[in-house]
Image (cartoon, rainbow, N blue to C red):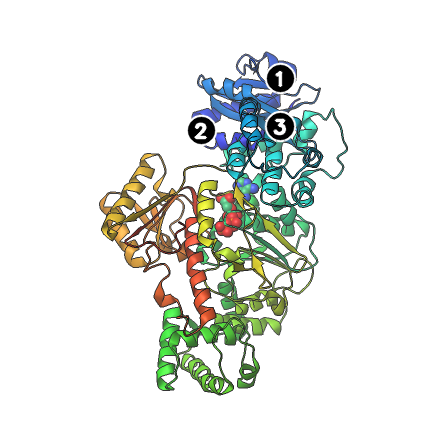
C-alpha cells in the first residue's frame, strides 16, 4: 500500500479552498490509502497522469474536481511514498507542475524544490550583466565552499550572477529552500562555518552517509521541517478535517532544536525578532517537558491575561485537547501567579493599584515632604532601584548601586529620599493597598521560604519583566536542569525594565539561542519596520550586552507598507476608514484587521467613524473572542503579542511619538531620557510588526522622528 506525505506548499493552498473542493481532496487522498500503486494508476476518478514537458519526470496531476487539480510527486525508484505538493486550478496546474524540479540537497539531504525553468531563463541574461558589475555578492566564496554548503551546479551558476541583496531577494521564490537559506545567511555576513552549523547540521540526519541513489522516501523522511508523513487513516482525516495549524507540524530546524532538546543544564534563553516563532517554540517546549515525565508540572507565563488566554487555546491545539497533559500546565501571567501565592500563603491580599494611582501617591509624598523631585522621578527611583534590588532598609539603599540611573544622588540626597519611600509604603498600607510589583516582592519572599511550586517554568514575552517578577519565577522552580525556558525579544521592550538575569540567579551563559526567520510578516513590512530601530542599539535580554537583528528575515513577500501624512487628523481618520473598507472589500474579515494608536482619544474617534461607516468594530481591551466579528481597535501597548492580516497604525505624529510627558527631560536624568525615547521607539516597532500582509502607517502634520526616511 502506498504512503502519503504532504508538503507545506500544499497547506498554503488547501487552507483557502472552499468546502466542496476540500471534500474532493479528502476523497482523493483516501484512495491513496486504500488502493495499491497499480490500482491508483488505473483509477479513472483519480486520473493520475504525467505532466507533459515536466522537468521532473515524477510530476503527476490528479483530478479533484472539474476545476481543481492536485499536484503529486510520484516515486519512480521503487519506494512508495507519494508527496502531495499543491492544489491549484486546472489551467495553472500543468504549467506550475511542468516548471518545478524536486531534488535532494547534497548537504542537508532534504528534499527541496526550485522553479527550474525560471532560473534557466534568467541566468544567461544575468550572467552578461554580472560580467560588467563592479562586485558580486558571493565573490568571496569558492565553488568548493558553496558546494559543501549544498549549493548545486544550477544554483551555483545563478549565484555567480547575484550582485546585491535586492537581486538575491528576487531569486528567493525560485531557489530550492535550503540552498536559499544558506545564501541568505552568507549574504548577511555569517561565515561558512556558522552557516554549516546553523543551517546544514541542524537539518542533516545524524546517520546520513553520501548516497547518490537516495530514494524519494528517504529524502521525504529527511525533510521534517517542510513535509509531514501520514501514517494511518485516522491521522489523515484528522489533519484534513481540522483547521491546519502549520506551526504545530512544521517547525523550522532552529525552533525544533531549541524546543525538543532533551535537556538543558540550567536556564535557557531564546531570542529573535517579532514573528520568529518564539511563542511557538515555548509551546513546543511545554509539550516536550510534559511528555518526558508523567508527573511533571509546568508553569507557562506571559505578559497579559489576553495573551495567557491565547496561549491556553494554542496549547490545547498542540496537545490535541489531551486533558491529562493540559491539567499539568498552569498558564498565567507572572502577576496573577504572584497574587495566587500571596493570597494562598499569607491568607490575605492587599489590593493592587495602577500606575496612575501610584503616581498620585508619589505626588502627595513629594508635596508633604517638600521634596525637590517630581513624582515621575520618585516613581522611577522606586521601580528601578528600590524594588529592582529589593532594598528594604535605609542601610541597603545607602549602599546600593543605582545602575541605569543617569542622575547622581549624593549621600545627603539619598538620606532625604529614603523617608519618602517609607511614607509611600505606609500610605499604601493605610489604604490596605499595594502595587503589583509589591505583590511580586512579597510572593518572592514567601516562595524563598517554602518549596517550589513547579518542576519547570516556561516564560514567554520575557523582555518586559521587572526584577521583582523574575524573583517570583526564580522561586517557582528549583535551580537545576530545565528549570527556566525563557523567550523574548529585547527590541519589543515597551515598559523599560532593566534586568541583569545573572544577578537574579538566572544565568543563561552558554545556553542562548536565536531565531531568525519571521513567519508572520512579509519581508517588505519587516524591512520597513526594522528601519524604525536602525538608529539605535538595544540591551540584550539578560542585561549582559547589546542585541541585534542581524540575519532577521522573512520568506514571505507582498506590498510595501503605505506610509502617508495628512494635513489634519480628520483627514487622516477618514483615510483610515477608507483603507479599512478597502481591505474588507478585498475579502479580509474585519476581525483580521487591527487599527492602533498611541492614545485612546484618537482611537475613540476612529471607533466612531468606522461605526458611522457601518464597519463592525471591537476593542481589544474587551478581549473579544475569535468568534466576535469587528475590526480590532487597540492602543499600541495592547498590540503586544497579537497579529493581524492588515494593520493600520495612525497618529504617528511628532507630538505623540515620542510622547513628551512620558519622556524624562535629559536635564533631569540623561540615561533615563535615552531609555524613555528607546521605549517609545520600540512601541512603534511593536505596533508595526503585528501586520502579516498589509501595513498602513499615518500621521497628521509633522511625522514622528521615528518614521524611517
Ligand atoms: N514553524 C512555523 N510554521 C508555520 N508558522 C509558524 C511557525 N512558527 C511560527 N509560525 C507562525 O508565525 C507567527 C508568529 O509566531 P509567534 O507568535 O510564535 O512569534 P513570536 O516570535 O512569539 O512573535 P512576537 O515576538 O512578535 O510576539 C504565528 O502566526 C505563528 O503561528
Closest to the observer: 450 or 550? 550
Looking at marks 3 and 2 on the same chain, the residue that comes earlier in the sequence is marked by 2
Residue at the disc numbered 2: 17
Circle 3 residues within 10 Å: few <14, some 14–19, many ≥20: some
Residue at the disc numbered 1: 57
- Local SS, label 3: helix
Closest to the observer: 656 or 36? 656
Image side of residue 686 versus residue 597, left or right: right
Establish if 252 lies above or below 118: below
Establish if 81 lies above or below 532: above
Residue placed at 50% from the left, 19% from the top? Answer: 95
Establish if 436 lies above or below 483: below
Establish if 462 lies above or below 190: below
Give percent across and percent down for residue 608: 24, 51
Let me know if residue 252 appears in the view. no
Residue at the disc numbered 3: 157
Let me know if residue 636 appears in the view. yes
Closest to the observer: 553 or 468? 553
Mark 3 vs mark 2, CA separation in Å: 38 Å
Give percent across and percent down for residue 561: 39, 43
Residue placed at 70% from the left, 22% from the top? Answer: 79
Mark 1 vs mark 3, CA separation in Å: 23 Å
> Which callout, 1 or 3, points to the residue nearer the camera?
3
Looking at marks 1 and 3 on the same chain, the residue that comes earlier in the sequence is marked by 1
Label 1–label 3 contact, CB within 8 A? no
Closest to the observer: 96 or 149? 149
Looking at marks 2 and 1 on the same chain, the residue that comes earlier in the sequence is marked by 2
- Local SS, label 1: loop
Residue placed at 42% from the left, 28% from the top? Answer: 18
Amino acid at each position: 500500500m502506498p504512503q502519503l506525505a504532504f508538503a507545506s506548499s500544499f497547506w498554503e493552498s488547501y487552507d483557502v479552498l472552499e468546502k466542496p473542493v476540500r471534500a474532493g481532496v479528502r476523497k482523493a487522498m483516501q484512495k491513496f490509502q486504500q488502493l495499491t500503486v497499480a490500482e491508483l494508476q488505473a483509477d479513472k476518478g483519480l486520473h493520475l497522469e504525467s505532466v507533459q514537458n515536466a522537468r521532473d519526470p515524477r510530476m503527476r496531476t490528479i483530478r479533484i474536481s472539474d476545476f481543481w487539480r492536485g499536484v503529486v510527486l510520484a516515486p519512480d525508484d521503487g519506494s512508495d511514498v507519494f508527496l502531495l505538493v499543491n492544489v491549484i486550478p486546472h489551467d495553472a496546474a500543468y504549467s506550475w507542475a511542468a516548471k518545478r524540479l524536486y531534488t535532494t540537497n547534497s548537504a542537508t539531504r532534504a528534499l527541496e524544490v526550485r522553479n527550474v525553468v525560471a532560473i534557466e531563463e534568467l541566468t544567461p541574461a544575468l550572467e552578461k550583466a554580472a560580467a560588467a558589475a563592479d562586485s558580486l555578492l558571493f565573490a568571496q566564496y569558492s565553488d568548493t565552499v558553496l558546494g559543501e554548503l549544498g549549493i548545486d551546479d544550477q544554483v551555483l551558476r545563478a549565484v555567480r550572477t547575484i550582485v546585491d541583496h535586492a537581486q538575491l531577494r528576487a531569486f528567493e521564490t525560485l531557489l530550492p529552500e535550503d540552498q536559499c537559506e544558506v545564501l541568505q545567511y552568507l549574504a548577511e555576513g555569517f561565515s561558512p562555518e556558522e552557516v554549516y552549523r546553523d543551517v546544514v547540521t541542524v537539518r542533516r540526519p545524524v546517520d546520513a552517509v553520501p548516497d547518490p541513489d537516495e530514494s524519494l522516501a528517504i529524502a521525504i523522511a529527511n525533510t521534517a521541517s517542510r513535509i509531514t508523513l501520514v501514517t494511518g487513516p485516522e491521522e489523515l482525516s484528522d489533519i484534513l478535517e481540522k483547521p491546519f495549524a502549520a506551526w504545530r507540524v512544521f517547525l523550522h530546524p532552529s525552533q525544533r532544536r531549541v524546543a525538543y532538546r532533551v535537556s538543558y543544564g540550567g536556564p535557557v534563553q531564546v531570542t529573535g525578532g517579532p514573528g520568529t516563532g518564539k511563542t511557538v517554540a515555548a509551546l513546543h517546549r511545554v509539550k516536550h517537558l510534559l511528555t518526558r515525565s508523567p508527573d511533571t508540572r509546568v508553569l507557562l507565563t506571559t505578559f497579559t491575561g489576553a495573551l495567557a488566554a491565547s496561549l491556553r487555546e494554542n496549547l490545547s491545539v498542540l496537545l490535541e485537547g489531551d486533558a491529562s497533559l493540559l491539567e499539568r500546565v498552569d498558564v498565567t501571567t507572572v502577576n496573577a501567579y504572584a497574587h495566587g501565592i500571596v493570597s494562598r500563603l499569607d491568607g490575605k491580599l492587599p489590593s493592587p493599584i495602577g500606575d496612575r494611582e501610584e503616581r498620585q501617591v508619589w505626588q502627595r509624598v513629594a508635596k508633604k515632604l517638600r521634596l525637590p523631585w517630581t513624582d515621575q522621578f520618585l516613581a522611577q527611583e522606586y521601580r528601578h532601584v528600590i524594588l529592582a534590588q529589593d532594598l528594604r532598609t535605609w542601610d541597603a539603599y545607602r549602599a546600593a548601586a543605582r545602575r541605569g540611573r543617569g542622575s547622581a544622588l549624593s549621600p545627603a540626597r539619598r538620606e532625604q529620599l529614603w523617608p519618602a519611600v517609607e511614607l509611600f509604603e505606609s500610605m499604601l498600607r493605610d489604604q490596605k493597598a499595594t502595587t503589583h510589583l509589591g505583590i511580586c516582592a512579597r510572593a518572592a519572599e514567601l516562595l524563598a521560604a517554602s518549596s517550589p511550586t513547579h518542576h519547570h517554568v516556561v516564560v514567554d514575552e520575557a523582555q518586559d519583566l521587572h526584577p521583582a517578577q523574575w524573583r517570583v519565577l526564580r522561586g517557582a522552580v528549583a535551580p537545576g536542569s530545565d528549570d527556566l525556558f525563557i523567550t523574548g525579544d529585547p527590541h519589543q521592550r515597551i515598559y523599560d525594565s532593566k534586568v541583569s538575569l545573572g544577578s537574579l540567579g538566572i544565568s543563561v551563559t552558554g545556553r542562548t539561542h536565536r531565531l531568525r526567520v519571521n513567519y508572520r510578516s512579509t519581508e517588505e513590512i519587516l524591512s520597513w519596520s526594522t528601519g524604525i530601530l536602525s538608529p539605535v542599539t538595544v540591551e540584550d535580554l539578560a542585561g549582559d550586552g547589546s542585541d541585534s537583528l542581524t540575519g532577521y528575515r522573512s520568506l514571505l513577500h507582498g506590498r510595501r507598507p503605505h506610509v502617508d501624512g495628512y494635513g489634519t487628523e480628520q483627514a487622516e481618520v477618514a483615510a483610515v476608514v477608507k483603507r479599512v473598507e478597502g481591505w474588507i472589500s478585498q475579502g479580509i474579515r474585519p476581525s483580521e484587521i487591527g487599527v492602533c494608536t498611541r492614545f485612546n482619544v484618537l482611537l475613540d474617534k476612529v471607533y466612531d467613524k468606522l461605526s458611522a461607516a457601518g464597519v463592525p468594530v471591537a476593542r481589544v481591551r474587551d478581549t473579544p473572542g475569535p468568534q466576535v466579528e469587528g475590526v480590532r481597535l487597540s492602543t499600541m501597548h495592547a498590540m503586544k503579542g497579537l497579529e493581524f492580516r492588515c494593520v493600520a497604525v495612525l497618529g504617528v505624529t511628532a507630538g505623540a511619538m515620542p510622547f513628551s510627558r512620558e519622556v524624562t527631560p535629559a536635564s533631569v536624568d540623561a540615561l533615563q531620557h535615552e531609555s524613555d525615547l528607546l521605549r517609545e521607539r520600540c512601541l512603534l516597532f511593536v505596533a508595526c510588526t503585528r501586520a502579516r500582509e498589509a501595513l498602513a502607517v499615518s500621521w497628521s502634520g509633522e511625522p514622528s522622528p521615528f518614521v524611517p526616511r
